[in-house]
Image: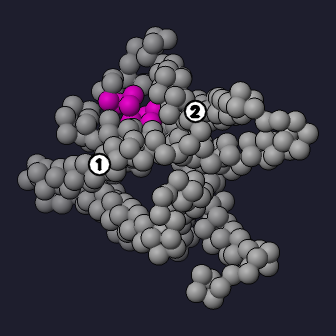
Amino acid sequence: MLIAFSYPFVFSVWVSLYEVITGMSEGDLPHHWYTDQRFTLFLLCVFLILPLSVPKEIGMQKYISVLGTLAAIYLTISVIVKYYTRAIPETYLFPIYSSGISTWASMFSVIPTICFGFQCHEACIAIYSSMENKKLTHWVFISLMSMFFCLIIYSLTGIYGYMTFGKNVAPDVLMSYSGGDVLMIIARLLFGVSIITIYPIVVLLGRSVIQDPLLKRRGKHFTVTNFFEMCTRVSLTVTWIMTTLLIAVFVPDISKVISVIGGISAFFIFIFPGLCLIFAMQSQPVSARLR
C-alpha cells in the first residue's frame, strides 16, 4: 500500500519537472533517448530522491520541508494572481462552467481523491518521533494547524483554477496554463520541489515497517552491527524507489492509481486509527483525558 502511495509523488515530480525543462509535453518533442521521460525520471530518482531518502533519521527533512511549504504557498498565490490578471475575451466574460452535478454518483466519485489528498496518518508517526516536544497538546496543535493549512491551500488553488478555466480545466491545473508563462513555469518547478520533500518521509516510514522487524529478529540470535543496519537500510531504500520508479514508468495514467489508492486510504483515515486506539486501550491503561 505504501509503495503504491509513493507512486503519485514520483509521477507528479516527473510530469512537472519535465514540463518545466522542455516547455511542452513529451508527444510534442522529437523522440530521442535523452528526451524520453523515463530517462529523466531515472536520473531524478538516482541523483536527487535517493540521496534524500537514504538517511536513517527524519530530522534533516524539517529543513528541506520548508522549501515544500513555501512552494505550496507560491503555487496558490500564482493561481490566484493569474485569475485576476487574465485577459478576458470580448465574446464572454467568464469561462464556461459545468451546469451542475449530473448524478449523485459523480459527486461521490471525488471522495477517493479527497481522501488521498488528506492521507497523512502514516507520516505522522515518523514526524512525531522526531519532535523534541512530544506533549499531546503540542502535537494536537501542530496537527490541526497542518490540516488547516492544507485545507486553505487545496481549496484556494482548486477554486481559482476552476474559476479561471471553467470545465476546461486540466486534471493538473498547472497544465492548463501556457508553457511559456514564466510565473507558472516557476510554479511547476516549485511544485516538483514540494513533492520531492514529501517523498523521503513516506519512504522512511515504509522502510521502518520492514526494517525494524528484521533487525529485531536478527538481534535475537546475532549482534546487529551498524554496518548491517546500513546495508539493510540502503537495500530497502533502493528497492523501494526502484519499485515506484517502475510503476511510474509502466502505469502512465495517474488518475486510475489515485482512485484505487484513495479508496484504500479511506481505511487508513476512518477505520485503522480507531482500531489502533481500541488495541492500545486493551494492551495498556489509557487515561480518560488521553483517550
Q: Residue at x 32, y 30 (%)?
A: 20
Question: Is residue 113 found left or right of 169 in the rendered image?
Answer: right
Question: Is residue 214 found left or right of 174 in the rendered image?
Answer: right
* Screen quadrant of the C terminus: bottom right
Q: Is residue 165 visible?
A: no
* Amino acid type of the residue that numbered disc 2 sits on in the rendered structure: Val
Q: Is residue 38 above or below residue 183?
A: above
Task: Answer with mark 1 or mark 2, whichever residue precedes in sequence.
Answer: 2
Q: For residue 13, which quarter of the picture?
A: top left
* Amino acid type of the residue that numbered disc 1 sits on in the rendered structure: Leu
Measure the C-alpha gap from mark 1 to mark 2. Answer: 24 Å
Disc 1 designates what residue?
Answer: 70
Disc 2 designates what residue?
Answer: 54
Seen as rendered, the residue at the extreme left is 90
Mark 1, Cα crowd under 10 Å, few <14 / some 14-19 / many 20+, is some
> Where are the magenta residues, as a range?
13-20
Q: For residue 273, which quarter of the picture?
A: bottom right
Image spot of residue 114 (x, y percent): 50, 63
Question: Is residue 259 found left or right of 197 in the rendered image?
Answer: right
Overall secondary structure of the magenta section = helix
Image spot of residue 249 (x, y percent): 58, 29
